[in-house]
Amino acid sequence: MILKRLFGSSIGRKILVATTGLLLIGFVLMHMLGNWNMFFGREEMNTYAAFLKSIPGPLWTARIGLIVVFILHVIIALKLKMESSAARPVGYKKGNTMRASLASRYMAQTGLLILAFIIYHLLHFTFGQVDPNTFSLLDDKGRHDVYGMVVHSFQNPLVSASYIIAMFFLAMHLIHAVQSMLQTFGLAGEQSRPLVQKISVGVALFFFIGYSAIPVSILAGLVGLNG
Ligand code: HEM
């Protein structure tokens, strides 16, 4: 009954997009904090990666949950986008288009670019298809050398650049996502608009800098194979 109401109305679908979006931001935050182990060296990063694999029950529950949440988010968000375009068959008037921010106009495009990045990223670091040689590295304790794999990969400027560009699209997506999520949850009114804008830009910058710091530090030689 409650599911029917959520899926069946436009506001219900907005709540679903906002809630799944919030859960995805939660994952992106946890993943970034985990990846910061790269700054503490091989031992910390590989221990963290080995720990995740040592708890297959919670790991697979989280993975399956993440996939379901991600699929729901994409499908419902695209449906909302098609509905709003259909309700406005002649498109925005020029004035409105000027007012709509760049980030808000390209939500579907930045979202689909993030999807493309995730497919590439999984092939790269989870399935080892992009660079099989570095994927099979082991550390001195015989564990998967995730640290070495990431350093080797990001020492290639093209790989690092592709990740930084993807993080830019993630940040663009987040700027509008955070604003519209706060609005859907009733936390953003006319008065609080400037504050909400600051929060959303802050969140986007936090993730952009936090993730990009890894390839940038590797390219700059601050994080290296001897770590
Ligand atoms: C500098 C940026 C990033 C680095 C260095 C990085 C690193 C990694 C590594 C090493 C793995 C494999 C872990 C393992 O098998 O032990 C992984 C998996 C994954 N990453 Fe990232 N990641 C980055 C950005 C992102 C972003 C922005 C997203 C999402 C938008 C993301 C989503 C995922 C997902 C969904 C997995 C699979 C998780 C799993 O297998 O359980 N990553 N990442």
Image (tube, rainbow, N blue to C red):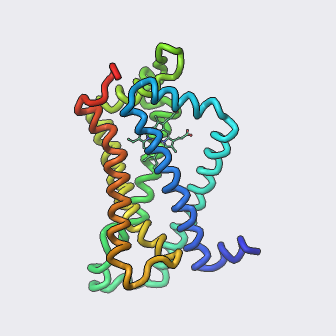
On the picture, is 51 further left or further right than 204? right
Percent x, y of residue 135: 46, 24
Left or right of residue 16, residue 91 in this image: left
- Outermost residue toward the left in this view: 220
The residue furthest right is: 1
- Quarter of the figure with the C terminus: top left
Q: In the figure, residue 36 lies in which quadrant?
A: top left
Q: Identify the image quadrant of the N terminus.
A: bottom right
List x then y, in percent, for residue 60.
66, 41
Please tell me whether residue 53 is drawn above or below residue 31 in the rendered image: above
Residue placed at 28% from the left, 41% from the top?
161
Q: Residue at x 28, y 35 (%)?
A: 217
Work out whether residue 74 can be spotted: no
In depth, the one of 22 and 130 nearer the eye is 22
User: From what the image shows, is residue 212 above or below residue 39?
Assistant: below
For the point 29% across and 80% down, the residue is 99
Q: Position of residue 209 (x, y in %)?
A: 31, 49
Q: How many marks?
A: 0
* Residue drawn at point x = 40 percent, y = 24 percent: 148
Task: Determine if residue 71 is in view.
Answer: yes
Residue 127 location in percent, x, y? 52, 32
